[in-house]
Image (spheres, rainbow, N blue to C red):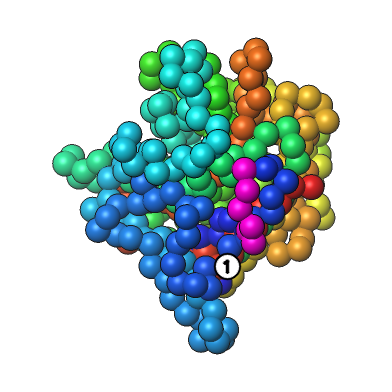
């Protein structure tokens, strides 16, 4: 089992009713993955698990040489397929790729703030796989994502902003230069601490995490208390109030993904209605159900869609780290 859990599909169709399944057993990526944000000198590799004869898992590696890999226009075309939902030329709406990305504030306590260690390095590093555009789906349609992965133990003692899986929405109207619509759901690894965040527009809330060295708050039912502004103004990183409500399991702390394979399962119905929700399970254990206004307000007359990416997207970090993905399943519910 490995850290790149993405698509679980036995058939491929432009229909949203298609189940997707990927176990990487073939030892190669198929046409459902777009690799334009994977560095050519650090391609995705595959390895076997001695405990599972014949099985393989994917390995996504990031090292100090990696920069913010961006998709060029010619590469972006490879992510599209016939009827894949391209936005017409001249549209007032934009794809996620047209926005600058911003890792934004971190919530992890007990760690020092991140600083760039070398002035000649890129500010961020990206090694991400994403599903092709035909596998995007209506954000309001309930889908289950199950990702089985593990990763190297990270010893860096800073709040390094680090995303290992993200769910983004598009099309979104242009909000002006310098603003990045953050993933409405993100699986993070800040400072080597697994944690999950959800957006209510420009208010990001911590919904679950593994235990950090000096974590002082407790998970409580009702309104979320750990929320910060993500819009790049003078208030960025300040506390904000969201409409999100949490219901936690009896043991909501996440287990770290470093001691062995773990499966994160997400049931997602994103939208601006009180009935919308995200439910999280780890290895069959109920963690949390978040309900309320999830994600962004769609532009009038548009259907906002969900796009899935996984791998590494982090502040510059002087270490080599591997995300291993054993399987990814995506299915409508």
In percent of width and height, residue 215 lies at 59, 48
Comparing 206 with 201, the one in front is: 201
Is residue 12 inside the magenta stretch?
yes
Q: Residues within 10 Å of mark 1 (few under 14, many from 20)?
A: many
Q: Is residue 9 above or below residue 297?
A: below
Secondary-structure class at tag 1: loop
Can residue 272 be seen in this snapshot?
A: yes
Q: Place residue 322 in its image quadrant.
A: bottom left
Which residue in the structure is indicated by mark 1? 23
In percent of width and height, residue 218 lies at 71, 45
What's the residue at 49%, 72% (across, down)? 26
Is 275 on the left-hand or right-hand side of 215? right
In percent of width and height, residue 186 lies at 57, 42
Q: Place residue 5 in its image quadrant.
A: bottom right
What's the residue at 69%, 50% (across, down)? 18
Q: How many marks?
A: 1
Q: Main secondary structure of the magenta part?
A: loop
In percent of width and height, residue 58 lies at 46, 66
Is 63 on the left-hand or right-hand side of 162? left
Boundaries of the magenta span = 9-14
């Amino acid at each position: 089992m490995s850290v790149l859990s993405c698509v679980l599909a036995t058939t491929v169709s432009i229909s949203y009713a298609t189940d997707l399944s990927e176990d990487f057993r073939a030892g190669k990526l198929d046409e459902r993955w777009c690799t334009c944000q994977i560095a050519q000198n650090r391609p995705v590799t595959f390895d076997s698990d001695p405990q599972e004869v014949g099985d393989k898992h994917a390995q996504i590696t990031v090292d100090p040489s990696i920069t913010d890999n961006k998709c060029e226009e010619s590469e972006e075309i490879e992510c599209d397929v016939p009827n894949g939902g391209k936005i017409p030329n001249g549209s007032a709406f934009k794809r996620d790729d047209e926005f600058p990305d911003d890792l934004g504030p971190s919530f992890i306590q007990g760690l020092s703030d991140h600083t760039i260690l070398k002035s000649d390095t890129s500010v961020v590093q990206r090694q991400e796989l994403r599903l092709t555009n035909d596998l995007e789906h209506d954000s309001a349609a309930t889908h289950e994502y199950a990702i089985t992965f593990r990763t190297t133990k990270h010893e860096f003692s800073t709040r390094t902003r680090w995303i290992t899986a993200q769910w983004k929405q598009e099309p979104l109207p242009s909000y002006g230069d310098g603003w990045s619509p953050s993933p409405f759901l993100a699986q993070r690894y800040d400072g080597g601490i697994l944690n999950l965040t959800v957006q209510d527009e420009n208010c990001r809330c911590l919904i679950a995490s593994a235990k950090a060295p000096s974590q002082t708050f407790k998970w409580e039912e009702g309104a979320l208390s750990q929320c910060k502004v993500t819009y790049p103004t003078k208030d960025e990183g300040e506390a904000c109030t969201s409409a999100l409500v949490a219901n936690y399991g009896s043991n909501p702390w996440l287990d770290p993904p470093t001691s062995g394979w773990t499966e994160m399962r997400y049931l997602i119905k994103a939208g601006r209605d009180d009935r919308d929700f995200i439910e999280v399970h780890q290895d069959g254990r109920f963690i949390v159900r978040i309900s309320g206004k999830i994600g962004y307000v769609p532009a009038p007359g548009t259907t906002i869609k969900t796009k899935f990416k996984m791998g590494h997207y982090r502040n510059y970090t002087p270490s080599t780290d591997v995300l291993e993905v054993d399987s990814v399943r995506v299915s409508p519910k």
